[in-house]
Image (tube, helix red, strand yellow):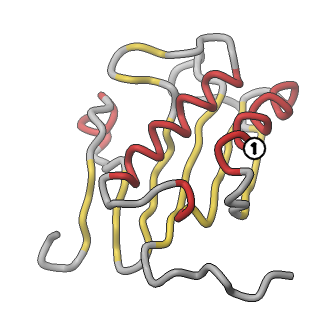
């Protein structure tokens, strides 16, 4: 923890150093995970497969919040960025497999492209690490 109460986690992405960012930042009760793809080091997993890329990206994003002792049940928001509208169902299927019982709020957006043209999916997460919100009024 830094003196300002903010803690940052790196994942080893080559872009973290060259662009100057952290994979995840915890501040107060929130942990925010920046854009995460299916790259692990120099290797892109699931090339050409939006479902596989989404699964790997979510797994990597969840590994980042695990550094703060959190799991999928702590996720309150997800964002999915896709390069092709045709991939909506496959990426949505991956999201449902990971978060179906959690039901975070989510946004899915089709974008023009990413820093590497082989990337089909990029995801972001926000997690809550305060007192349990389970049992809150459901509507």
Secondary structure under tag 1 reads: helix
41 left or right, relative to 61: left
| 3 up-or-down from 7: above or below | below
- Residue 19, image x, y percentages: 32, 40
11 left or right, relative to 38: left
How many numbered discs sit on the rendered protein? 1
Q: Residue at x 37, y 54 (%)?
A: 24
- 40 or 118: nearer the eye? 40
| 50 up-or-down from 76: above or below | above
Crowd tier of the residue under label 1, counting other residues whose Cα lies within 10 Å: few below 14, some 14–19, many 20 or above: few
74 left or right, relative to 93: left
50 left or right, relative to 44: right
- Residue 125, image x, y percentages: 54, 55
Find disc 1 in the rendering and name its residue: 96
Q: Quadrant of residue 65?
A: bottom left
- 94 or 121: nearer the eye? 94
- Residue 13, image x, y percentages: 32, 31
- Residue 49, image x, y percentages: 69, 15
- 110 or 104: nearer the eye? 104
Q: Residue at x 66, y 24 (%)?
A: 120
Quadrant assignment for the C terminus:
bottom right
Quadrant assignment for the N terminus:
bottom left
Q: Residue at x 45, y 53 (%)?
A: 33
Residue sitting at the far bottom: 137
């Amino acid at each position: 923890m830094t003196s300002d109460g903010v803690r940052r986690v790196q994942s080893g992405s080559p872009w973290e150093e060259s662009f100057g960012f952290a994979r995840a930042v915890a501040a107060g009760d929130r942990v925010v995970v920046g854009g995460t793809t299916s790259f692990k080091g120099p290797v892109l997993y699931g090339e050409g497969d939006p479902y596989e890329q989404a699964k790997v990206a979510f797994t990597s994003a969840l590994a980042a919040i695990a550094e703060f002792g959190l799991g999928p049940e702590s996720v309150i928001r997800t964002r999915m960025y896709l390069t092709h509208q045709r991939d909506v169902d496959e990426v949505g299927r991956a999201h449902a497999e990971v978060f179906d019982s959690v039901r975070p709020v989510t946004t899915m957006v089709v974008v023009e492209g990413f820093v590497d043209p082989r990337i089909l999916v990029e995801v972001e997460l926000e997690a809550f690490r305060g007192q349990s919100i389970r049992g809150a009024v459901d509507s």
